[in-house]
Image (cartoon, helix red, strand yellow):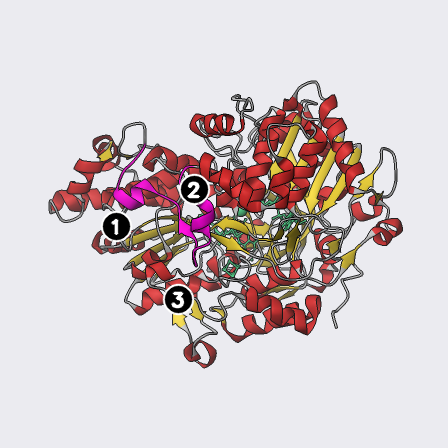
């Protein structure tokens, strides 16, 4: 038996607030996985699905990009190699609930537009291609050929291919991603914005300049072997739960953990591993040895202060702190970096970080004494105006101590979507390097455009200004995930055609262009049978390991096509059957796609053979493998940055938008942010009790959120309840995507153009 989807929207008045938890996982996590599984999939399917999750013969978790243990590193997979949120991700996809043509006949689009993301997503899996014709009130069924012809007609009518925008979310397989970018470039544009533009783009930009490669330099085994792990701006207990097992293992070998975060996230404090007896009945493992409760955006200042202290200690006792051998042989720019940090303004550092100076010294001391340090970070670092500089300042400290390209040490941007890194490797990027484009051109004999395309923010601007007319989304939920919700919705509504390849109903289907299509697709968990037999796909995790994923469950509907099939059939409708690219052959047998990936994508030689090895293979990473840095200087670059942090006028707060424990980005699994003690509601704003008192608001009061932007403009999100919460002083937090309306489109990170979702100047307005 499965339980029905919610018939009503969220009743925000049911909010319950409990004390935040001091520990993560344990038995409640196991219980929630099972309950959610059975509610959505029934008992039999739950057992089948969870047995296949993250196993070599099964499918890759559609949750986050955290890696599995690899035999080659001397590590072993467990029988249950997943977490509570992985189980929820599977339940959400493998649900037995369905959204078919009757559903759309019953609900007008205008009705659906009034529903929350939670309600929309919980209705179930999409089963048939649907079209919303110009002026119609309801989506109606359309056959696949009709749908592809419609898209091809619209694309052909554009005055330039650059009027089309092809978005990708990070769940798309390597095979589909490779074909998608090939279709887009064959069509004649590089307009390939992706979710990464809103996510780790800042990490890519920072690391490419500093180390010559925009990816992290550690393996899971390095984390296990580190003696110090610094976790900055990340909430692993919720967003990368199995990272807690890795931290626990490292701690078992004596490692220390430093957590830098404005919120005392339960998953940073203590972990009760449900897979060992101590985690079930005992107190679990304490995680953070130092918890630095930093102000939003204060990390650049913190790492400058750390750099300053390390240099000062080196001066006092030469040869004890700085790794001179590494710096001389492999780095560039150390002298100007050191000069910049010789003198720092401690008052500014205090103001930016809000930290106790003694704690900063303690943290620097731990870093100075560590022989093997791993630095992990995520959205708390990447979604700031000065994100790129902040990541480079973290990198500087790592380089100073030679913490790259050696066992147990390195840089670890922890990726979000399960294949977001693979999509980039396969060419989904609006500005792929010349080498890749030239290889594509040679391999297929098609002209490949060189002009850079639109990223996410530029795509919104283009649609707003009438320069973007057709929007196609390969997964994701563009309307809800992007900043400045009202502006973005207007932009999407001004398109001639919006098309979404999706598994579940979401906001982007109801914020539509003049004509709109929903193309339902297979998920990771489902068997994919083509003319050449049963297919598997491949993905790359956060640590550059590429491996197979084989769905086994029966598909949600017989009408579904795989993403690969959708791309190939659209390409044939658009280019005809005489095209230089053998689309039909690719659709029938994914080995043929991998043969071509092997020829075009660096590091993917013998792809078919190597991906079939038990744990797949690891892509080359020159700094990690041989301390080779393919930067402009041929060395690892130290970067010199000005001290920068968000300035907040009196009477205002600084707001971050973040994930609850019960959502996957815009997909809301449920209403239990268990670790933070927030239950049954989502429109809440968390503020420190003392700030509330100073601002004259009471815990539990209803407010509107007003954001103030530097050009004097304001944005609003109405009806939030204030919750007194132990965040850093002067800071506030609200959930994404409810608070996205507050982020101005032009508020972006320097160099990466990533929306600044973690530093919004906020005024509370009494209702
Ligand atoms: N269950 C689940 N898993 C997920 C996702 C999900 O939605 N649900 N999303 C996936 C995706 S796409 C991504 S990108 C990742 C996101 O993973 P995270 O980056 O962990 O996600 P956020 O919820 O945005 O949390 C940001 C964390 O950084 C802290 N923070 C915010 N601003 C600052 C700051 O200025 N400085 C510091 N030091 N800390 C700060 C916040 O308090 C919070 O703990 O998770 C992935 N995994
Ligand atoms: N304010 C604010 N905004 C943010 C963030 C933030 O922290 N704060 N985080 C940003 C980040 S890090 C990210 S990554 C983006 C996320 O942006 P997106 O990736 O665009 O959003 P998701 O919510 O992950 O997409 C969910 C939808 O994907 C579809 N889907 C799920 N599985 C599949 C599949 O296998 N195939 C296909 N084709 N479709 C599938 C379903 O229809 C589902 O509704 O949001 C960004 N936006
Ligand atoms: S840590 Fe991430 S990839 Fe691993 S099971 Fe959990 S959600 Fe899935
Ligand atoms: Mo992300």
- Percent x, y for residue 247? 38, 63
Pick whichever, 467 or 111, lies toward us.
467
The answer for how far apart the CA atoms under marks 3 and 1 are is 22 Å
Mark 2: is the Cβ under 8 angstroms from ligand 2?
no
Which residue is disc 2 drawn over?
604
* Nearest to viewer (mark 3 / mark 1): 3
Element carrying mark 2: loop
598 to the left or right of 107: left
Residue at 70 percent of width and 41 percent of height: 500
492 to the left or right of 317: right
Quadrant assignment, res 331: top left
- Magenta segment boundaries in residue numbering: 602-630
* Nearest to viewer (mark 2 / mark 1): 2
Residue 406's tag is 1
Residue at 51 percent of width and 35 percent of height: 427
Pick whichever, 483 or 294, lies toward us.
483
The answer for how far apart the CA atoms under marks 2 and 1 are is 24 Å
Q: Is residue 302 above or below residue 24?
A: above
Q: Earlier in the sequence, mark 3 or mark 1?
A: 3
Q: Earlier in the sequence, mark 2 or mark 1?
A: 1
How many C-alpha atoms fall within 10 Å of the one at disc 3: few (<14), some, or many (≥20)? few
Element carrying mark 1: loop
Which residue is disc 3 drawn over?
76
Q: Are marks 3 and 2 in contact (CB under 8 Å)?
A: no
Mark 1: is the Cβ under 8 angstroms from ligand 1?
no
């Amino acid at each position: 038996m499965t339980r029905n989807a919610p018939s009503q929207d969220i009743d925000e008045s049911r909010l319950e607030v409990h004390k935040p938890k001091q520990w993560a996982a344990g038995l409640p996590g196991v219980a929630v996985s099972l309950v959610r599984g059975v509610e959505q999939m029934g008992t039999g399917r739950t057992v089948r699905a969870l047995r296949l999750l993250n196993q070599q013969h099964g499918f890759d978790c559609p949750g986050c990009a955290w890696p599995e243990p690899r035999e080659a590193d001397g590590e072993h997979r467990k029988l249950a190699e997943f977490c509570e949120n992985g189980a929820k991700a599977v339940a959400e996809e493998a649900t037995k609930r369905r959204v078919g043509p009757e559903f759309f006949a019953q609900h007008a689009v205008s009705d659906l537009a009034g529903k929350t993301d939670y309600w929309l997503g919980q209705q179930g899996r999409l089963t048939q291609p649907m079209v919303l014709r110009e002026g119609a009130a309801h989506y109606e069924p359309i056959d696949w050929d009709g749908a592809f012809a419609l898209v091809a007609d619209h694309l052909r009518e554009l005055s330039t291919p650059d009027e089309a925008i092809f978005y990708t979310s990070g769940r798309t397989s390597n095979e589909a991603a490779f074909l998608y970018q090939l279709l887009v470039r064959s069509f004649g544009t590089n307009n390939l914005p992706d979710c990464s533009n809103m996510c780790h783009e800042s990490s890519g930009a920072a690391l490419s300049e500093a180390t010559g490669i925009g990816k992290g330099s550690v393996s899971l085994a390095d984390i296990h072997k580190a003696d110090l792990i610094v976790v900055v701006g990340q909430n692993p207990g919720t967003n990368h739960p199995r990272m807690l097992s890795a931290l626990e293992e490292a701690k078992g070998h004596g490692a220390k953990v430093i957590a830098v975060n404005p919120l005392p996230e339960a998953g940073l404090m203590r972990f009760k591993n449900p897979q060992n007896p101590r985690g079930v009945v005992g107190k679990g493992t304490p995680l953070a040895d130092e918890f630095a409760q930093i102000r939003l955006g204060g990390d650049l200042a913190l790492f400058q202060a750390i750099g300053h202290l390390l240099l000062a200690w080196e001066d006092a006792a030469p040869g004890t702190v700085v790794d001179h051998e590494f710096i001389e042989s492999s780095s560039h720019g150390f002298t100007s970096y050191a000069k910049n940090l010789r003198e720092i303004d401690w008052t500014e550092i205090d103001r930016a970080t809000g930290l106790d100076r003694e704690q900063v010294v303690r943290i620097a001391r731990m870093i100075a004494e560590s022989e093997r340090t791993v630095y992990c970070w995520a959205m708390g670092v990447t979604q700031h105006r000065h994100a790129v500089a902040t990541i480079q300042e973290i990198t500087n400290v790592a380089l100073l101590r030679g913490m790259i390209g050696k066992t147990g040490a390195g840089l670890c941007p922890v990726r979000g979507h399960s294949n977001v890194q693979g999509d980039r490797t396969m060419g989904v990027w609006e500005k792929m390097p010349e080498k890749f484009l030239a290889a594509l051109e040679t391999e297929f004999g098609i002209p490949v455009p060189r002009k850079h395309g639109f990223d996410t923010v530029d795509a919104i601007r283009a649609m707003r200004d009438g320069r973007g007319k057709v929007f196609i989304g390969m997964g994701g939920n563009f309307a809800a995930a992007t900043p400045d919700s009202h502006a973005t919705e207007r932009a999407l509504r001004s398109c001639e055609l919006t098309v979404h390849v999706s598994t579940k109903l979401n906001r982007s289907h109801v914020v539509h262009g003049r004509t709109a299509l929903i193309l339902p697709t297979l998920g990771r968990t489902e068997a994919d049978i083509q003319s050449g037999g049963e297919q598997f796909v491949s993905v790359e995790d956060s640590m550059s390991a590429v491996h197979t994923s084989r769905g086994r469950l029966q598909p949600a509907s017989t009408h579904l096509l795989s993403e690969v099939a959708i791309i190939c059939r659209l390409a044939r409708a658009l280019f005809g059957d005489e095209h230089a690219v053998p689309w039909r052959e690719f659709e029938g047998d994914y080995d043929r796609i991998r043969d071509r990936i092997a020829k075009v994508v660096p590091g993917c030689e013998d792809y078919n053979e190597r991906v079939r090895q038990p744990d797949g293979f690891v892509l080359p990473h020159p700094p990690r493998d041989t301390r080779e840095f393919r930067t402009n200087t041929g060395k690892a670059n130290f970067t010199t940055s000005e001290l920068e942090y968000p300035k907040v006028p009196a009477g205002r707060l600084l707001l971050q938008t973040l994930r609850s424990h019960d959502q996957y980005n815009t997909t809301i699994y449920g209403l239990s942010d268990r670790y933070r003690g927030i239950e049954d509601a989502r429109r809440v704003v968390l503020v420190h009790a003392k700030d509330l008192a100073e601002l004259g608001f009471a815990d539990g009061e209803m407010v509107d959120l007003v954001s103030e932007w530097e050009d004097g403009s304001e944005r609003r999100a109405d009806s939030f309840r204030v919750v007194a919460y132990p965040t850093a002083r002067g800071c506030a937090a609200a959930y994404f995507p409810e608070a996205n309306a507050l982020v101005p489109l032009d508020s972006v990170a320097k160099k990466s153009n990533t929306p600044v979702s973690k530093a919004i100047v906020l005024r509370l307005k009494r209702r």
